[in-house]
Amino acid sequence: MLNYFQKAWEHLKRDQNHKVWQEGYHAKLVETNWFMKQKVNYIYNNPVKDKIVSLPEDCYFSSARNYAGLENDLEVILLDLF
């Protein structure tokens, strides 16, 4: 996998050895609950979209389980977003 990340950066002009994130994705400042909820829902629904799980809370190592009131090995502080 490390070789894959090394090859992913070769075409870039930045001084780096590996690339994990796709090109064009940049950090955004989260300033509102609406924006946070949108991003959390996007992350939760990625495995559903890719047909890895049927529901976001079916992904065991996801805080979606905590919000759904299900058992999880992750210690999560629930925010009042949903």
Image: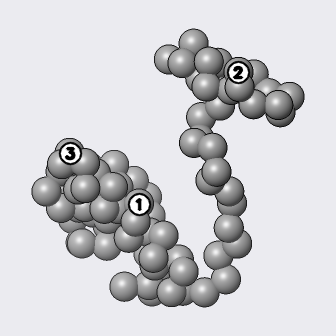
Are the residues tagged 1 and 3 within 8 Å (C-beta)?
Answer: no
Query: Which residue is under mark 2?
Result: 10
Is 30 rendered above or below residue 2? below
Q: CA distance from mark 2 to mark 3?
A: 31 Å
Q: CA distance from mark 2 to mark 1?
A: 28 Å
Is 75 rendered above or below residue 52? below
> What number is the disc on residue 43?
1
- Residue at 20% across / 45% down in the picture? 52
Kind of element beneath mark 2: loop
Kind of element beneath mark 1: helix
Kind of element beneath mark 3: loop
| Upstream in sequence: badge 2 or badge 1 | 2
User: Which of the 4 image quarters holds residue 29?
Assistant: bottom right
Q: Residue furthest left?
A: 54
In the image, is 55 to the left or to the right of 1? Answer: left
Is 17 rendered above or below residue 12? above
Are the residues tagged 2 and 3 within 8 Å (C-beta)?
Answer: no
| Upstream in sequence: badge 2 or badge 3 | 2
